[in-house]
Image: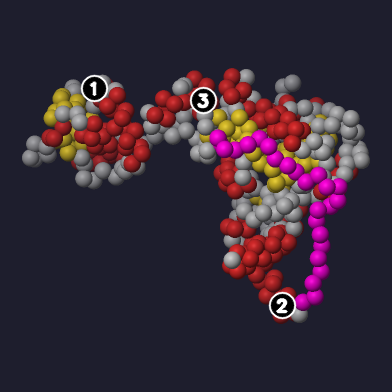
Amino acid sequence: MGRAKEIKIKVIPSKIANEFVKKYHYSKSFTLGSVLHFGAFLDNKLHGVLSYGNSIDKRNCIGFVKGTKWNEFIELNRMAFDDYLPKNSESRCIAISIKLIKKNAPHIKWILSYADGTQCGDGTIYRASGFYLTNINKNSTIYKMKDGSIKAKHYSSKTVKFDFKGATAMKGFQLRYIYLIDKKSKLNVPIIPFEKIKEVGASMYKGEKIERCN
Amino acid sequence: MNMKIKTYKIKSNPNNPRLIKDDKFRKLVKSIREFPEMLEKRPLVCSKDEEGNYIVLGGNMRLKASKEAGLKEMPIILADDWNEAQKKEFIIKDNVGFGQWNWDDIANEWDQENIQDWGLDLPGFDIDGSELDTEFSLDDSEKDAIQKNTFTLSDEQSEEIHKAITEVKKTDEFKYCETFGNTNSNGNALYLIIMQWAEQKK
């Protein structure tokens, strides 16, 4: 693990987290729905951010796990790291952040997150962190705009009105992951074996389409 | 071949296009004070002018810092065999960084305090983490914490309000507006307008 074990995770203000996400997240954007931000510190500097918050489509997502009440789940909706952090840092940061959620917000029973297999990756980090893969969806919401920027259509319809004329849907997949903090919780959605990612051609690592050898 | 020249005889290049910030300059002075031998291995590159002064082509910052550090002599290499075009080309090429740092190696194999002391800027945000905590609380109410409110407005009032909402969404304040988990941008914008009004009233 090397120096990954020296990383300290602390709660940071949204302003700092959002600035960091804007700089280091592949989308160059943050979400307004984030309510809890963890910072990953190494050598007295901030090198990573994990932002948790409400899902945009909370009413639909709540049903993914049986009997979930309104505030019993949270979405890991942004995760950004700079290149300074050593290998395995991401999964370590996720693990610590989950531990802190468990301690400070014991009512949270599960965590939802999405891997963007159109531009970023198929969720290697989530798999290494014990998340279940619960859906692989051909992208229909992430669009490349005429000016080259990337926008999420479902999000924009609720927030800023973008002009999607001439925009094209990005090729690739979106993968839904769920982590059960409360191990007694029961998923309402099927667990998909990780091999399926390769089968459907959804493999992607750091923005590159790949063929997995495992 | 290196020559040792009295520092007062070496002049900065008046056309040097490089700048150095105060904190970086202080680090360079410190670095030279602590390890002046490095100048022997990396001498200044100079050309001689008609008055016999040595004009720096490469190493203007080191010259400035060495003077500040109190060095009386400095090693130089002469580049008088170059024409003016070559000298100009050198000034730029000498300062272009083609490589990049492998931050993973830097983080794992090098002493971080030393490396920052030597003047290398590490990536990441400078934030005083000492006062940050690991404790927090999240809403644990069982109810949907979102309310829908209805107001009756005249067409004119409605138009003005929508105009204000559109305007406030374009501001930086909106980006950082407290949302309390609300993902409705109109609601967040309206809240921001009210907060700004409340602030003005103070």
- Residue pushed farthest front? B202
Relative to B177, B73 lies left or right: left
Q: Chain of mark 1?
A: B
Q: Are marks 1 and 2 in contact (CB under 8 Å)?
A: no
Judge by depth and name the residue closer to the eye, A80 or A208.
Answer: A80
Magenta region: which residues? B129-153
Residue appearing at x 19%, y 29% in the figure:
B71
Give the image quarter of residue B89: top left
Q: How busy is the neighbourhood of tag 2: few (under 14 within 10 Å), some, or many (20 plus)?
A: few
Q: How busy is the neighbourhood of tag 3: few (under 14 within 10 Å), some, or many (20 plus)?
A: many
Tell me the number on the disc at residue B107. Answer: 3
Point out residue B93 in the picture as x, y percentages from the top left corner.
32, 36
Relative to A105, B166 lies left or right: left
Looking at the rendered structure, the secondary structure element under dot 3 is helix
Q: Chain of mark 3?
A: B
Are labels 3 and 2 on one chain? yes
- Whichever of labels 3 and 1 marks the residue nearer the N terminus, that label is 1
Quadrant of the image containing the C terminus of chain B? bottom right
Q: Chain of mark 2?
A: B
